[in-house]
Image (tube, rainbow, N blue to C red):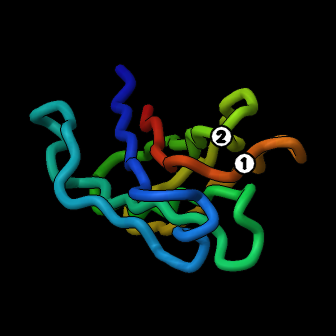
Amino acid sequence: MFVSKRMFAAGLATTVSAVALSVGAMAAPASAAGSVDCRGAVHGVDTDRGIASCTNNSDRTIRFRAEVVCGRAPDVSGDWVTLNPGQYGQSSATCAWYSTGVGSVGWTIE
């Protein structure tokens, strides 16, 4: 089963470059509800790079990856990251050079 969450940035991508975007509770199956904490952010210097950070507070191993929406360019996905219980990790993806920047950062959890 996949759990996916998307975070939308307000305004132009250039205005959110230094703003860390965060999300509250995420939709998850009952067995995993509230067990994985994630947040999305636009890189502070490179506005074409989106980062998803997750902490696995569950009692099982999970995998997640960043899902980045790019302005005027194809959307991109980061590498899958495996987290054992209690671990923290990041996945990132960079929009194409001709993009207008990151529009939103989300994540998919397996």
Relative image position of residue 101 (x, y in whole percent): 69, 52
Tag 2–tag 1 contact (CB < 8 Å): yes
Between 46 and 28, the residue placed more toward the observer is 46
- Locate residue 99 relative to residue 41 in the image: left or right: right
**CA neighbours of label 1 inside 10 A, class few (<14), some (14 to 19), many (20+):** some
Q: Which mark is residue 70?
A: 2
- Locate residue 72 relative to residue 97 in the image: left or right: left
Farthest left residue?
Answer: 30
Q: Secondary structure at mark 2?
A: strand
Relative image position of residue 68 (x, y in whole percent): 60, 42
Of badges 2 and 1, the one in the foreground is 1
Q: Which mark is residue 100?
A: 1
Relative image position of residue 60 (x, y in whole percent): 35, 46
Residue at position x 56%, y 39% in the image? 67
Image quadrant of residue 69?
Answer: top right
Image quadrant of residue 58?
Answer: bottom left
Q: Secondary structure at mark 1?
A: loop
Residue at position x 35%, y 20% in the image? 1
Mark closer to the chain start, 2 or 1: 2
